[in-house]
Amino acid sequence: FVMSFHKVILSIISILATFIQVEFQSSSSLFDEHFWIISTFFVVFSIYVVSWITVTMQKRPPNTENDNDDRVSILSQVNLLVGALAAILLLFIILPLLGWLAFFFWLLYSLKTVCDLVNFDAFFQLLQILKNAFSQFYEKLKNAFLQLLEKLKNAVYGDQSQEPEIPGSM
């Protein structure tokens, strides 16, 4: 099933690359007009190819025990997202408006994928622990600051706990 998505992604990339080649037959260079998009495309496509090779090498025959199924599944999903991003970057060159629309949907799907992969219970538990630790730290810091202020007040004004002496009343 995932392999068919890779075929679709590679087909879309090759079709878009052909359209770009036809569009930029003139004397203008593709790198002159779209330097950042092309540079980003090469980086993203390289990541796609390397992660695809990694996923392919990590898969084992169905008979053997596979203790890293989760990692392969996560890497496979990231791989598909990166491949789709590579195709979207080429779409930015041909039809920028459609590229932005595709990028928006890619972003939404990426967020959905991240939400599916992240264990939110553990995340919220970590946030609660951090909140409690910060509250304890804040209380200790506040108490230390109040003690410091009290010592400074005593040093400047003297100890105010004694009854003031009235001159001549002995």
Image (spheres, helix red, strand yellow):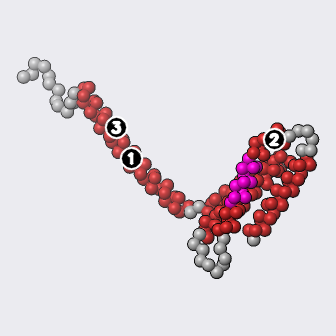
Question: In the image, 36: left or right of 117?
Answer: right
Give the Cα separation between the discs numbered 2 and 3: 59 Å
Q: Where does the image place residue 91, in percent across and percent down from the top left?
A: 82, 50
Closer to us: 33 or 124: 33
Q: Residues within 10 Å of mark 2 (few under 14, many from 20)?
A: few
Q: Where does the image place residue 123, in percent across and percent down from the top left?
A: 53, 58
Magenta region:
40-51
Q: Where does the image place residue 160, in percent across and percent down from the top left?
A: 21, 30
Q: Are marks 1 and 2 in contact (CB under 8 Å)?
A: no
Closer to us: 77 or 160: 77
Question: Where is residue 52, by image quadrant?
Answer: bottom right
Mark 2 vs mark 3: in front: 2
Secondary structure of residue under mark 1: helix
Vertical side of 66 occupied by 131: above or below:
above
Asked whether the viewer can see residue 77, the reply is no
Hey, what amino acid is under mark 3? Phe
What is the number of the mark on residue 145?
Answer: 3
Hey, what amino acid is under mark 2? Phe
Question: In the image, 40: left or right of 154?
Answer: right
What is the number of the mark on residue 31?
Answer: 2
**Residue extending furthest bottom?**
63
Give the Cα separation between the discs numbered 1 and 2: 54 Å
Which secondary structure is most common in the magenta stretch? helix
